Amino acid sequence: MLLLIGATLGGVGYKVAHTIWTARVDEMRKEPLKFLDRLPDVALQLKDFHRAKIEGGRKVWELWGEEARYLKGERQAVIKKPRLIFYDKNERTLEATGDEGRLFFTDEELEEMNMKGGVRVNYQGYVLRTEEASYFKSKNQVVAPGKVTLKAEGLELEGVGMEIKLEEEKVRLLKEVKTKVHPNQLENQGLRADGKKKS
């Protein structure tokens, strides 16, 4: 009789533990940051990190990294060798890579990202290189405080300090700006020296 009672209690205990574990796994998949906030105040480390944000059935951004550490107290993640892709409403992409990335969150939202070390940004045939760049969601803007080079076929720009307004697709170099235009390369693309299409 005792064996039967013990086996029954063991089965019930297993079923309850399994149900709780399944609920926790589902919660972690749906809202990973809320789940991480319940853990003790330690850093969580992940290998082969990948995260994406989907809004209204459309991918907004996607992030990969060799390794990620989530720092609960500061509500930030530190990513080794990050690769970030922003998708705009017209299916165009902006891709950024670097040696280290720091993501800052409020609730479930990415509010700010800072990349350092060999930062490279590709957007519609333009390649930007700098040592540090930050993305601010509130302004939908990328800012680089240091030396920046921007290259496209037929055009090279260099300066110190840069702002990219993503919604307006405007790039502004702030100081010490140098420009090189290669008219023959522009002509091969069917462009005039001012960047407009030839008629």
Image (cartoon, rainbow, N blue to C red):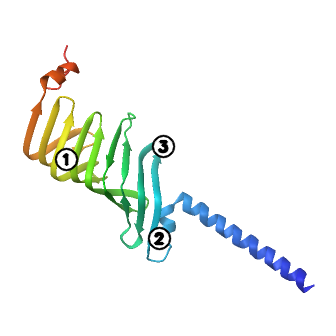
Look at the numbered disc 3 and give the secondary structure of its residue.
loop
- Cα separation between marks 2 and 3: 26 Å
| Labels 1 and 3: the sequence-earlier one | 3
| Labels 2 and 3: the sequence-earlier one | 2
| Disc 3 residue type (three-letter) | Gly
| Disc 1 residue type (three-letter) | Glu
Task: State the residue lying farthest toward the bottom.
Answer: 2
Q: Position of residue 92 (x, y in %)?
A: 36, 35
- Cα separation between marks 2 and 1: 34 Å
Q: Is residue 44 left or right of residue 5?
A: left
Q: Nearer the viewer, mark 1 or mark 3?
A: 1
The structure residue drawn at horizontal position 28% and vertical position 53%, both measured from the top left corner, is 136
The structure residue drawn at horizontal position 8% and vertical position 43%, both measured from the top left corner, is 177
List the residue tagged with mark 3: 56
Look at the numbered disc 1 and give the secondary structure of its residue.
strand
Q: Position of residue 112 (x, y in %)?
A: 31, 57
List the residue tagged with mark 2: 37
Q: Count of labels shown? A: 3
Location of residue 175 with respect to 6 vertically, above or below:
above
List the residue tagged with mark 1: 163
Split into 4 quadrants, where in the image is the N terminus? bottom right
Q: Nearer the viewer, residue 18 or 98?
A: 98
| Disc 2 residue type (three-letter) | Asp
